[in-house]
Image (cartoon, rainbow, N blue to C red):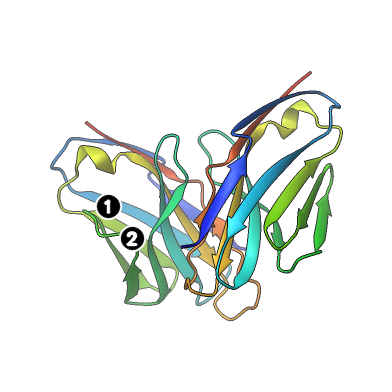
Amino acid sequence: SQTIHQWPATLVQPVGSPLSLECTVEGTSNPNLYWYRQAAGRGLQLLFYSVGIGQISSEVPQNLSASRPQDRQFILSSKKLLLSDSGFYLCAWSPRDSSLETQYFGPGTRLLVL
Amino acid sequence: EDQVTQSPEALRLQEGESSSLNCSYTVSGLRGLFWYRQDPGKGPEFLFTLYSAGEEKEKERLKATLTKKESFLHITAPKPEDSATYLCAVLGSSNTGKLIFGQGTTLQVKP
């Protein structure tokens, strides 16, 4: 069965510091990968998605970037965090070659920027 | 622009009191409508995918239905463990893998 991991689970960072959040998927090959952010009291917003190694599409212009160095690894980064970057970050995957486009979510990373 | 609206925002039920959650959507070329359950501090847990009007799916006390404009999540004889936020999302033909989420309905079931 497929499993998706995210770390760290919780992170408290000062404004202006760098960020690196990691997501890995097990039990599947060539997944589509996604980064979402869920701000308090708001719905999930897609930040980035990737259909393969090195292929990243950005949905929202922002202070963040994403990379996919390996098939099942997706990284969310920032060079300098802003207060507005605080939120709950969720990684998700979906099968690449399937008519079933369900996305499955990881446990999330809670980020607090102070 | 694709849009999803969920109602009510919050719902309190007594154990055993059945009810329905609504998800209204506008989307260009629906490729799928998804229901998730999210517990506090956790990632969304997949419940159902519906693809076409008239489709229904069931899982334990939950039943999801779909029309051309909305979806309902029916909860029959709920238990306290059904308490969670239920999220609805759509995937349209104009969006490459981009799920459009509603704000969610927070359900509290009291014993």
Is B106 placed above or below B101 here? above
Report the quarter where the N terminus of chain A lies: bottom right
Is A67 placed above or below A53 here? above
Tag 1 secondary structure: strand
The amino acid type of the residue labelled 2 equals: Ile
Residue A53 disc label:
none
Residue A36 in the image, given as x and y percentages of width and height? 42, 54
Residue B79 in the image, given as x and y percentages of width and height? 80, 29
Report the quarter where the C terminus of chain A lies: top left
On the image, which quarter does residue B68 sit in?
bottom right
Q: Hey, which residue is sitting farthest bottom in the picture?
A: A97
Q: How many numbered marks, from 0 up?
A: 2
Q: Name the residue that disc number 2 marks.
A: A75
Residue B20 in the image, given as x and y percentages of width and height? 76, 39
Residue A26 appearing in the image: no
Q: Looking at the image, is mark 1 or mark 2 earlier in the sequence?
A: 1
Q: Is residue A71 left or right of residue A114?
A: right
Output the chain of dot 1.
A
Q: Is residue B74 left or right of residue A66?
A: right
**In 3D space, how far apart are the residues under numbered discs 1 and 2 (Cα atoms)?**
7 Å
Q: Name the residue that disc number 1 marks.
A: A20
Residue B52 appearing in the image: yes
Q: Residues within 10 Å of mark 1 (few under 14, many from 20)?
A: some
Is B50 placed above or below B43 here? below
Tag 2 secondary structure: strand
Task: Using the image as rendered, state which of residue A68 and residue B20 is in the foreground.
Answer: B20
Is B78 placed above or below A71 here? above
Is the residue under label 2 in contact with that under label 1 (CB below 8 Å)? yes
Q: Are marks 1 and 2 on the same chain?
A: yes
Q: Residue at x 49, y 74 (%)?
A: B94
The amino acid type of the residue labelled 1 equals: Ser
Residue B50 in the image, given as x and y percentages of width and height? 72, 63
